[in-house]
Image (cartoon, rainbow, N blue to C red):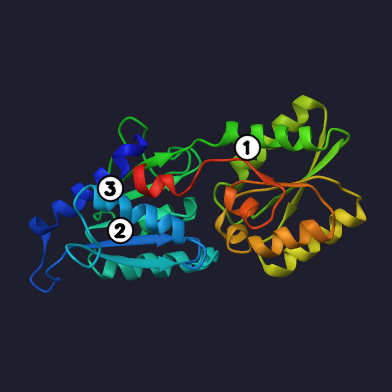
Amino acid sequence: MRRRDFIKVVALSVAAWPLAAHAQQPAMPVIGFLSGRSHDESAQLVTAFQRGLGELGYAESQNVIVQYRWAEGQYDRLPMLASELTNRSVAVIVTTGGTASALAAKAASTAIPIVFNVTEDPVKAGLVESLSRPGRNATGVTSLSAAIDAKRFSLLHDAVPDARVFAMLVNPDDPAAEVMTTAVENAAHDGGYKLIILKATKENDIDAAFATMDHQKLIALMVIAEPFFITRRAKLVTLAARHSIPTIYGIREFAASGGLMSYGMLFSSGPRRS
């Protein structure tokens, strides 16, 4: 699906709502919005989504209701949040903030249309049967970010040309972690560099990762853009500066928060135009 079709699919699902509506449902159709990120740091994303709906004639609280659910970077909360939305009999579930959000929504319902915005191959992730024929109730867009991950590594090397060993911080709970890690490992191997994989699934792991970089004298870091890290970007940026470690991030919000540099897709364009 092309980016400009993303909101159209959402709109079509909303438009079809009256055909399947039950008597006990509210007068307006309801869109479920499920994200692995947090509300506080997703204002631009929500604004872009609302603007996209507005371009198709939908205004929140006027002719459509949006129910937001935020996992705050905690993947284990997503199944419960997805179930809350399905229990509301929403017309469609829009997912963003990582592949885990889409997988949770798909597991929660085989009937409610799901429109996702992910960074990995949705076929390999198990979201759709094929890119040309998604099948079942899920469709959406992907940036297929393997090439972006490799380019990000190249930019980090350009910033620290004397480095021979690089570190990469990943969250192994992220379903896309393996794909992204493999892409960067291949880029490092092709250039004759060594890549150290550091893992973090909770706050203390982030502190431990920077302690490991100090101990091993690692001088360059790449941080994957995924909900757990995005919701803790202030901490990551602060630690990178405190330890004097040049770091590249996956989305511009890190750079806007004081990080050295970022390279990746503009996530707010996905929910609006994808």
Amino acid identity at mark 1: Asp
Determine whether, in the image, residue 190 is placed left or right of residue 5.
right
Return the x and y of residue 207 as percentages of the image width and height: 78, 65
Residue identified by numbered label 2: 109
List the single residue furthest toward the top.
190
Q: Amino acid at mark 2?
A: Ser
The residue sitting at 89% across, 56% down in the picture is: 214
Compute the Cα span from label 1 to label 2: 32 Å
- The quarter of the displayed image where residue 173 is located: bottom right
Query: Visible in this render: residue 106?
Result: no
Q: Which residue is mark 1?
A: 149
Mark 2 surroundings within 10 Å by alpha-carbon count, few (fewer than 14), some (14 through 19), many (20 or more): some
The x, y position of residue 107, in whole percent, is 37, 57
Which mark identifies residue 137?
3
Quarter holding the N terminus? top left
Number of numbered discs on residues: 3
Marks 3 and 1, how far apart in space? 29 Å
Marks 3 and 1: which is nearer the front?
A: 1
Q: Earlier in the sequence, mark 1 or mark 2?
A: 2
Amino acid bearing label 3: Asn
Q: Earlier in the sequence, mark 3 or mark 2?
A: 2
Mark 3 to mark 2: distance in Å? Answer: 8 Å
Which of the two discs, 3 and 1, labels the residue nearer the N terminus? 3
- Whole-percent x and y of residue 29? 18, 63
Neighbour tally class for label 3: few under 14, some 14-19, many 20 plus, Cα within 10 Å: some
Residue at left offset 74%, top offset 69%: 204
Determine whether the residue tagged by mark 3 lies in a helix, strand or loop.
loop
Q: Mark 3 and 2 residues: CB-CB less than 8 Å, in contact?
A: yes
